[in-house]
Structures are given as C-alpha cells and as structure tokens.
C-alpha cells in the first residue's frame, strides 16, 4: 500500500476530513477510503461486464450486433427401459 502525503491543506479542509473520517469510524490515515469514494462515485464502480461493454462500445463507435433469437433447450433423451 502506498503512503499519501498531502501538503498545504487549509484548516477548513483538514477539519472536514477529520469530521468525515470520524463519521466513518476511521482515522485520518484511512482517509484514502473517503477520497476514493469522492473520486470514484458508486455509479462509476460498475461490474466488470458493464465496464467492458462500455469500452467495446467506445472502440466500435457504438455499433451493436444483433443477438440471435433464443430457442427453448432440447428435450432430454429418455433412457428408460420402456423406450428401447
């Protein structure tokens, strides 16, 4: 894990960081979690499939392929003695 040193924080920002850390039951050394939440909001933290889909759409200029229609699965074969 890396260490983050922040210089020249104004008093109001430092106080707000301490308050926010206290509200989240963590020390100011664990403030990276608070910073991460501020920098990467939940709506941007989608799952891998959604991120890949968004990247592929960007690479292909939004071209989407038509998906083939799905059909019902085949019936399982009957291996009973009566059907020989």
Image (cartoon, rainbow, N blue to C red):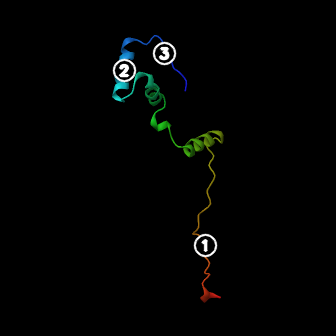
Residue 75 rendering spot, x and y as whole percentages: 59, 75
Q: Does the CB distance between marks 1 and 3 fall below 8 Å?
A: no
Residue at screen point 62% across, 49% down: 64
* N-terminal label among 2 and 3: 3
Residue 47 rendering spot, x and y as whole percentages: 53, 43
Q: Is residue 74 above or below residue 39?
A: below
Element type at marker 3?
A: loop
Element type at marker 1?
A: loop
Left of 56 or right of it: where is 21? Answer: left
Q: Is residue 9 above or below residue 73?
A: above
| C-alpha separation, residue under disc 1 versus residue under disc 2 | 62 Å
| C-alpha separation, residue under disc 1 versus residue under disc 3 | 63 Å
Query: Is residue 71 or residue 42 the one in the foreground?
Result: 42
Task: Residue under label 2, please give it.
Answer: 18
Element type at marker 2?
A: helix
Residue 46 rendering spot, x and y as whole percentages: 51, 41
Task: Residue under label 3, please give it.
Answer: 6
């Amino acid at each position: 894990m890396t260490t983050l040193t922040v210089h020249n924080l104004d008093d109001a920002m430092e106080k707000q960081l301490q308050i926010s850390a206290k509200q989240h039951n963590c020390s100011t050394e664990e403030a990276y979690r608070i910073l991460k939440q501020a920098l990467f909001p939940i709506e941007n933290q989608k799952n891998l499939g959604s991120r890949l889909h968004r990247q592929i759409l960007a690479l292909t200029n939004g071209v989407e392929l038509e998906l083939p229609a799905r059909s019902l699965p085949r019936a399982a074969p009957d291996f009973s003695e009566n059907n020989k």
